[in-house]
Each structure stands twice: as structure tokens, then as C-alpha cells.
Amino acid sequence: CHSIGKNACHMNTAIVRVESCIGDFACSDNSLDAEENGIEISSLSCQGFYACSMIATNIGINSCIGDYSCQLASSEIGDGSCMGLFSCFINSGPIANGSCRSDITKCDEVEGDCTRYLGACLSQSGEIGNGSCVGENSCCSNTGDIPDNNCLEPDSCSNCFEE
């Protein structure tokens, strides 16, 4: 793993492609059987604090960009998906290409406690089609299937509510 950041790739057994796993703890503590199961983190992916840590799935090209993005993900993530703070955090449903995207990527871009930020596709378990779930809190805690090019506004298709 050619990682950049404190403890990046620590205890990682997945196949990691170039320019991936950038940020403190990125790609750390991944599945112990990741290598034998062929789990791969594609190029230009997993960039941010704890991005792709503790995963058990394949990550597409240029995906999982943002602090805590794809942490604890267990279902395949396509290319250009999961962009933004807490995007696809605890994801357990497959995500196609260009989905689950929001603009804020770093904790220091959020006023107050960033751990309360509702990222795109946070804790979602349905199947997400191409180009869907765009904006903060979109498809958060979603359990149903979302077809291509749907849920294109912040808070759309979400079961999460800000307190």
C-alpha cells in the first residue's frame, strides 16, 4: 500500500491501486481475508480522515473522497461515488457509478460537531443506481432501491432528520 497519512493502510490486506488511501487512518483495519477474497481499492480512491477504514468490499475508481467516507462499508461501491463527508458511512447496499455525492468533504468545513453531519448515503442498505443520491443527507438510512438519476437534491430520499 503506497499510502500517505498517519496509520494509513495499517492492518490493511486489500489490494490498493495507485494514489489511494490518502489521509490519516485511511484504509486501516480492513478485513483480514480481504486479499484472499480479492478485495480491491481502485486508483484515486479513499482520500480523507478514516476513509475506507474497516471495509469489506471493493471500491471503484475515484470513489470515497472525504473524511469518514466509506468507513465500515460492506457492499460494492462503483466509480466516482461516495464523495463527501460521511458519504457511504456504514453502507451495506451496492452503489453504482457517480452516486452518493455532496460538496462538503472535510470536518473543518462544518460548523459545530462534524460527527452529526448527515452525509449522502450514510447508513444506507438499498441498491443505488447510477447518478443518484446527490446532496447532503440524500438517501441517508435508505433501505429501498433507488433507480438511476433519482434523489438529486439535499435531503431527498432520506430517512434521517437533523435534531
Image (cartoon, helix red, strand yellow):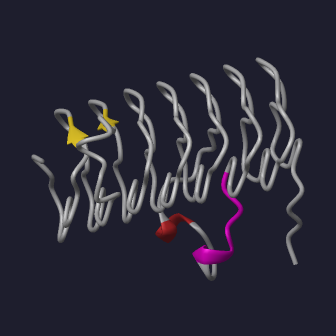
Left or right of residue 44, residue 91 in this image: right
Q: Nearer the viewer, residue 123 or 15?
A: 15
Q: Is residue 118 magenta?
A: yes
- In the figure, is residue 69 to the left or right of 19? right
Image point (15%, 56%), residue name:
4
Q: State which quarter of the image contains the C terminus.
A: bottom right
- Name the residue at 73% across, 33% down: 127
Q: Please give the range of residues in magenta.
A: 114-119
Give above or below for 29 relative to 12. Answer: below
The residue depicted at 58 percent of the width and 57 percent of the height is 89
Q: In the image, 89: left or right of 117?
A: left
Write the residue at 73% across / 28% down.
Answer: 132
Q: Position of residue 43 (x, y in %)?
A: 26, 30
Given the current orientation, which residue lies at the most extreme left position? 2
From the top left corner, tell me how far across and down residue 44 is, in percent: 29, 33
- Number of marks present in the image shown: 0
